[in-house]
């Protein structure tokens, strides 16, 4: 899957309740007419549950700071060619040019960013899982910056080939029922979109993507014992080889599926590049 990810932090003078009301209702309704024209097949808003005890548990395991995002909007694209065509339409370009003005009373652009990723599934169930408000699943996201002595490509290779294999080795212990590595990739389409919005985003170029896991909170609560401790120690030691954990952002939340259609994505033209 190719996905546009909008990692959003609210302004300090906006309450969580005010931001949530705008972001889940008015914000989506203003985007609805455009997303179909640019080939978005699925639109999910991931809401961070700031006060959920799962956040403290996860950060304690990985040693990540408390600073996080408020929402992550994810647009799954069926075919990048559809988005390219859509972005040539005058009505689409005019609409996107107004987005930053609409969001500016609510969004801290200087601490928010947009990047494109490709899914590299590591653990994936036969029947897909969503962390909805109707079940006990949480979606945990770790935004990962690669270590400065590495290149992004080198870090992504270790992430997929080594860390992914290590996680699969412990599949019977992990409280994750679904684990996807969302690898960041370059795209002129993303550059065009951000240019149209014209907002001064954070532009965290060191971000290599994000890990996304779906876990049943009941299973996570039962993760204990020497075997589990050894597993987590090995996973954390390995991830520290390519990720700056002190600069990572790790948080858990719930998904709001705003729009969904069947998706079949054609192969990428080259490794980790959408163009």
Image (cartoon, rainbow, N blue to C red):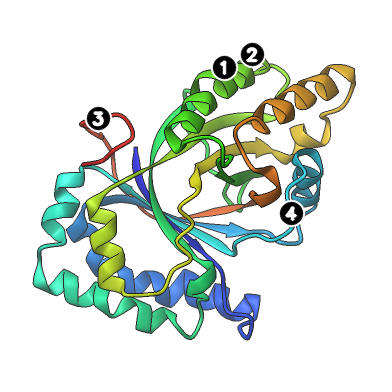
Residue 248 place in picture, x, y as percent: 64, 49
Q: Which residue is mark 2?
A: 169
Residue 183 place in picture, x, y as percent: 44, 38
Q: Which residue is mark 3?
A: 270
Does residue 41 appear left or right of residue 207 in this picture?
Answer: left
Does residue 195 appear left or right of residue 140 in this picture?
Answer: left
- Tell me how far mark 1 sits from mark 2, CA to CA: 6 Å
Q: Residue lying furthest top in this view?
A: 169
Q: Which residue is mark 1?
A: 165
Q: Are marks 1 and 2 in contact (CB under 8 Å)?
A: yes
Image quarter where the C terminus lies is top left
x 60%, y 33%: residue: 242
Q: Residues within 10 Å of mark 4 (few under 14, many from 20)?
A: some
User: Which numbered mark, 1 or 3, is in the foreground of this view?
Assistant: 3
Please say whether residue 127 is visible from this viewpoint.
no
Name above or below for residue 36 compared with residue 227.
below
**Mark 4 or mark 1: whose residue is earlier in sequence:** 4
Q: Which residue is mark 4?
A: 65
Q: Nearer the viewer, residue 147 or 43?
A: 147
When asked about the image quadrant of residue 167, the answer is: top right
**Residue 124, label in figure:** none
Name above or below for residue 235 compared with residue 196.
above
Q: Residues within 10 Å of mark 3 (few under 14, many from 20)?
A: few
x 45%, y 53%: residue: 205
Q: Are marks 4 and 1 in contact (CB under 8 Å)?
A: no
Secondary structure of the residue carrying numbered label 1: helix
């Amino acid at each position: 899957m190719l996905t546009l990810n909008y990692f959003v932090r609210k302004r300090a003078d906006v309450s969580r309740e005010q931001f949530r009301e705008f972001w889940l209702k008015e914000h989506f309704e203003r985007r609805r007419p455009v997303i179909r024209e640019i080939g978005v097949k699925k639109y999910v808003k991931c809401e961070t549950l700031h006060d959920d005890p799962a956040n403290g548990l996860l950060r304690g395991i990985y040693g990540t700071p408390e600073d996080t995002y408020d929402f992550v909007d994810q647009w799954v694209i069926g075919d990048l060619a559809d988005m390219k065509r859509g972005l040539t339409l005058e009505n689409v370009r005019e609409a996107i040019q107004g987005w930053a003005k609409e969001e500016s009373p609510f969004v801290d652009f200087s601490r928010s960013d947009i990047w494109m990723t490709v899914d590299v599934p590591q653990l994936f169930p036969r029947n897909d899982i969503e962390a909805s408000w109707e079940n006990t699943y949480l979606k945990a996201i770790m935004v990962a910056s690669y270590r400065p002595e590495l290149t992004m490509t080198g870090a992504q290779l270790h992430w997929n080939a080594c860390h992914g294999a290590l996680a699969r080795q412990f599949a019977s212990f992990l409280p994750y029922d679904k684990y996807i590595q969302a690898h960041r990739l370059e795209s002129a389409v993303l550059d065009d979109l951000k240019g149209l919005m014209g907002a001064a985003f954070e532009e965290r170029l060191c971000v290599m993507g994000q890990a996304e896991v779906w876990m049943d909170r009941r299973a996570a609560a039962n993760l204990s014992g020497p075997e589990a401790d050894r597993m987590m120690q090995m996973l954390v030691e390995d991830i520290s080889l390519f990720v700056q954990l002190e600069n990572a952002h790790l948080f858990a939340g719930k998904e709001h599926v705003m729009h969904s259609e069947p998706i079949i994505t054609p192969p990428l033209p080259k490794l980790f590049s959408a163009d």
